[in-house]
Structures are given as C-alpha cells and as structure tokens.
Amino acid sequence: MPSYILGISSFYHDSAAALVLEGKVIAAAQEERFSRIKHDDSFPSEAIKYALREAGIEIEDVEAVVYYEKPFLKFERILESYHSYIPKGLKSFLTSMPIWIKNKLFLKKIIRDELKKIGGYTGSLYFSEHHLSHAASAFFPSPFQQSAIITLDGVGEWATASIAIGQNNSIKIIKEMSFPNSVGLLYSSFTDYLGFRINNGEYKMMGLAPYGDSSSEEYQRFKKTICSELVEIFEDGSIELNMEYFAFGHSLHMTNEKKWEKIFGFKKRKANEALESAHLNLALAIQDITEDIVIKIAKTAKQLCETENLVLAGGVALNSVVNGKLRNADIFKKIWIQPAAGDAGGAVGAAMGYYFIAKENKRIPSTCKMKTADLGPAFIRDNIIEALKNSNLIWEEIESIESNLERTAKIISEGKIVGFFQGRMEFGPRALGHRSILADPRDPKMQQRLNASIKFREEFRPFAPAILEEHYSEYFDEKQNSPFMLFVHQLRAEKRKKTTPTYSWKERLDQIRSELPSITHVDYSARIQTVSELNDPVFYRLLQKFHKITGCPVLINTSFNLKGEPIVCSPEDAIRCFQSTGLDYLIIENFICSKPK
Amino acid sequence: MEFLHDLIDFIRTRKKYWLIPLIAILLIFGILIVYVSGSAAGALIYPLF
C-alpha cells in the first residue's frame, strides 16, 4: 500500500488539509474555499474530503494524520504569559480560557471525532511543532538538496522565528526566537494601529507603505521612535519588544494605544477613517524596519548554515516586498518560497515532516518538489454545464482550448475584464491563473476600474502582473523567477515614465508611471508572477496569445473573489461572483459566458 | 482519560510541575464556566487563542 500522510492545520486561521503521497504533495486546499468563510478556522473536513477524492482513497487508507502544532505547548505559553502579567489580563484570561477549556485543550479528541465523521479513521495521530511544520513546508517541497531555512510569523507555541538547516531528509533547528519577541506580531501591531484587520490587513499595509515619503522628517522620526521605544534590533536580527507598548501578551488588544498615541502623535486609525500622511509614513517606517530585521536574520542564517540556498515560511514570508529586498541583498544565490507560506502551508509541513523526518524516508528533490500551486479541485464538463444551466448566463462552449484562449486574449485586448477559471484551484493566498481575474495592464484606468467595480477594495491597492517567463528580465530588474507571486521587484528604468511630484498621495494614484500603468505601483514596483510553459501551459499560452495581439507579454492577474470573500472554488462560486460584479466575461474551462443584456 | 494521561506526560516531560495547581483549578472552574455560559467567545487576538 502506498504511503499517504494527511497534514492538517486548523483552529486558528486559514485551516487547510494536505495529502502527501510518497513524499510528494498531491492535494492541498484551504477550508475557506469550500465553506466560503474567509480565513475559516474550523476543522478542514471539506478540504480533507476533497484531498481523499483527489487521491481516490478512503480515510482508512491514510497511514498517519499529523496536526501542525502542539496544543499543550501553546497552552503552557499562554498560561505562563498570563502568570507573568498578573494582575493584568483578567478580562482577556476569562475570555480565552473557556475557548481553551472547551475546545483547544481537547484537540486530540476533537480531531479524532472529526476524522470519524469523515469515515472511521482509527490510525495514528501525531502533533508537530508549529515552526518545524513551517520549516518542513519550506524545505521539503523545495528544489534544494541543502538549504538554510528561515521561519517567521506571529507566534506558534513559543517560537516566533527560527533559523534551521535542511539537508536531504532532515531539518536541524539552529536558532529560535521566542514569544513575546516577534517580527510578525510587531508588524501586526502596526497593521492594527493603522486601522486594518490583523491576519488580513497586512497586505494592505504593505501596499500602502510606498505612498509614504522616505525623505520626510515625519518618516525619519517614526523610524527613530520605533527603534528607540518599541523594539531593539540586534545585529543577528533577533529583536526585543518593549512590552510596555504592546498589549497582546495579556489583553484583547495588540497595542497599548495611549502610549502609541503619545509617541507617534496620532490616535489609532478607525477602519473607515481617511488615510493621512502620518499613516502612510508609519506604514513605510515599519515596512522598512521589517526589511532590515529580515535581512539581518538572513545574514545570520548564511553564517550559520554556510549554503547558497534559502527557503522561507511563516506569515512574514508572505510579505513579498521583504522577499524582493532579500533577493536584492544578494545574501543567498537562490531563494525559494512555497505558495502557501502562511499557516495553511503548515498542513504540508506537518505531513512532509512526518514522512521525511519521523519515517526517515529518502528525499529526492526532483521528484518531491512543488512545481506548481495547483493542488486544489478541478471540475469536469458536466459539473460546469449543470452550474451554467442553473444560471441566467449566456454561454457558449468552444471546441478547442486554443480557440478559447485566442478569443479570451482578444477580449482582454479590447479592454474587457474576465474571470478566468481553469483546471485545479491554487493552494495558498494567491490566484495564479486558475481562479483569476485578468485584464489589460496597458490601460491606465484599469486599476481604478478593477478596484471600484470588480474588487470593491481600497483605491490604493496595486494589481499584480503575470508575465511570460522569457520576457521577465526585459521588464523587471531581476532574473530569478517568481512563479508564486511572492516577490516584489522594480520595473526597469526604460519602461518607466516620468511623473510630476505631488504632495497629495491621492493625486499619485492617477499618475501614469509606466507603459504598464495598471500594474506599476507608486514606487515602480510590482508583485510579479512569472509564467512558464512547463509549469502552467494553459495560462502560458493565453499570455502568449495576448502578447501576439498586443505586443505586451503581461496581464493583470488578481484573485477571483469579492472583497471579504475567499477566492472562488467551484463553477457555482465563479458564476455567483461574476453576476455580482462588473466583470465583462467569465471563462470556465472551454465555456465563454456573458451576462444577459 | 487519554487527555489526562497526555497532560501528565507533557508536564513530566517539560518539568513544569508548578503549572499543575493552575491547570487543575482552571479545569474545574473552566468546565463550570463553559457549561453554565453555553458558548465561548470568538477569538480576537490570536496570540492568546
């Protein structure tokens, strides 16, 4: 019987399941895609059922189930934290303890009960450490035989960051940083103070940061204040937070707001309040400080591991601006990050960690590497026809994929916006051409159109480009590929257009900064997806056809979802999203759909 | 019973014996709180949940 290992991450945020066959991930998905609850933290029953269906097995065929962290160790950290803050934290204690006592302490039983509901699983259940799961998720599916590993997130059990070395089928943790000193929680505290939701708004703050002015006195003051009051940064990249300014250790708030107000000179922003220059400069200051910290950690990792390769995981590894800067810093020759680098990817790490570390199986990177992110469900023609018949859409089936892609490319070149649904759904937070909204990046109004009538999101948020791999260095100052849209790089100087300086950040929104204005952020950067024929033939051919029509090898690629909703999973989800937005066309496999007039 | 067995094993491995009275009180009062109040509040700040 082949060895199937099921990895699970759940009960905090972004629950997911991953199925590993003989050391290779064959199916992985987040529960939110099935439940339609964004960042769903419930047990990933539907994701597990999908993974079993994909493999054509029953739950009894699974050799072991591995959960991505150790609940008792986490509980120990929480109790010790409360103990160290007594008498503070009573309200928070009384809120969090019932949750622990009712659910989280009994995770083993809860997981077993849930697995029984799926189909009578009675096999082994193991628990991996949170940061080991991250490290395993970063290294084992990587193309490297040996690599330095950096994990960085808010917090797991005790660890908040780690440096490890991965070699063949082993991982050795060399250095760890512990709660409450956390780069992720530092970043999230600013996310919260600037009026964005933690665990969700970090991307927004990252997108906002380039609107700050690094030459301003305010920015300099913020940066200095953060480093002198809030956090001490050591040469090896470790940090020490001044807990007088942070409340996450004992209360239901991230920061001690009154103290922050005193040092930064403005109150915590409410979600619906207008963005002022102070918000932009503070976002830029913490983004720059985070980059400094991560680069210092990377230098330490290089010294300790003596290797040319680096892999990263943990929520901070989803900060694509930091990742881009890390590449530019030239500390490591090659950097690889898997597409679900946050907690969802912990499911992959738990399963692969068990297979390689605990079972000591041989690892051959060429056979177990994760080449693409399309690990989710695909839907057959009958499913699509049924969903279309139940809708009021006008639809047509195109005979061949080539004609379909040709028509799609032409539609996009005419300024239309399409929902593009092809093959298996992506694993991780990025849509990579399987559940994407695509548009023409040459249109200067496209960013605003997409933000206002399709995505219903903040006007400052940039859109990402998908580019044919062979044209990558023609447009961007970087050579290493970015297949999972996890690196931000600068547009080449010759592709830029000169802009007039302006004081208002809102005026900068409308400036035409390059020949691809809708994917060029205010600082001439872009979060790039490189598309190769080998890894994604359908999306590659679409880009090729668009290139042939327009001479432009780039498309805007943004996730196929509405604000506040997860990315679409099924044809029904896609149809619903299509009907409630200003999308012009919906392409589901070989079906081209439009709205009734 | 498996839970208690695992918990004792954990405390023994970690040598955190001082947590025993705290956990015992918590479990007794916690069970009361949970079953009297019905449902637990949602998670707000992830370091504590």
Image (tube, rainbow, N blue to C red):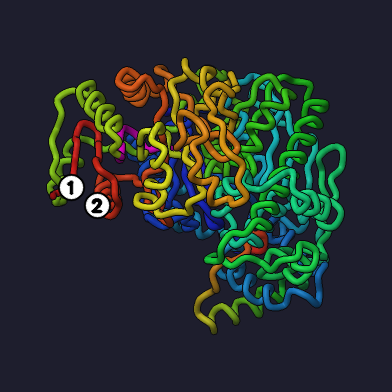
User: What's the distance in space between the residues labelled 1 and 2, CA to CA?
Assistant: 7 Å
Q: Say which label, 1 or 2, has the lower sequence index.
A: 2
Q: Position of residue A414 (x, y in %)?
A: 27, 32
Query: Viewed as shown, does residue A438 lie left or right of A380?
Result: right
Q: In this rendered view, identify the residue nearer to me: A57 or A236.
A: A236
Q: Position of residue A20 (x, y in %)?
A: 48, 33
**Residue at the top extreme, as displayed:** A470
User: Is residue A156 in view?
Assistant: no
Q: Position of residue A243 (x, y in %)?
A: 81, 62
Dot 1 surroundings within 10 Å: few (below 14), some, or many (20 or more)?
some
Q: In this rendered view, identify the residue nearer to me: A161 or A488.
A: A488
Q: In which chain is the residue bearing label 2?
A: A
- In the rendered image, residue B28 lying in the magenta stretch gets the answer no
Q: In which chain is the residue bearing label 1?
A: A
Query: Viewed as shown, does residue A339 lie left or right of A441?
Result: right
What SS does tag 1 mark? Answer: loop
Picture residue at 27% right of the left edge, 48% below the top: A578
Q: Which residues are magenta?
A: A417-427
Picture residue at 59% right of the left edge, 52% below the top: A504
Residue that numbered label 1 is attached to: A595
Picture residue at 68% right of the left edge, 32% below the top: A325
Query: Viewed as shown, does residue B21 lie left or right of A33?
Result: right
Q: Amino acid at mark 2?
A: Gln
Q: Are marks 1 and 2 in contact (CB under 8 Å)?
A: yes
- Magenta span: predominant SS is loop
Picture residue at 60% right of the left edge, 37% below the top: A523
Residue that numbered label 2 is attached to: A579
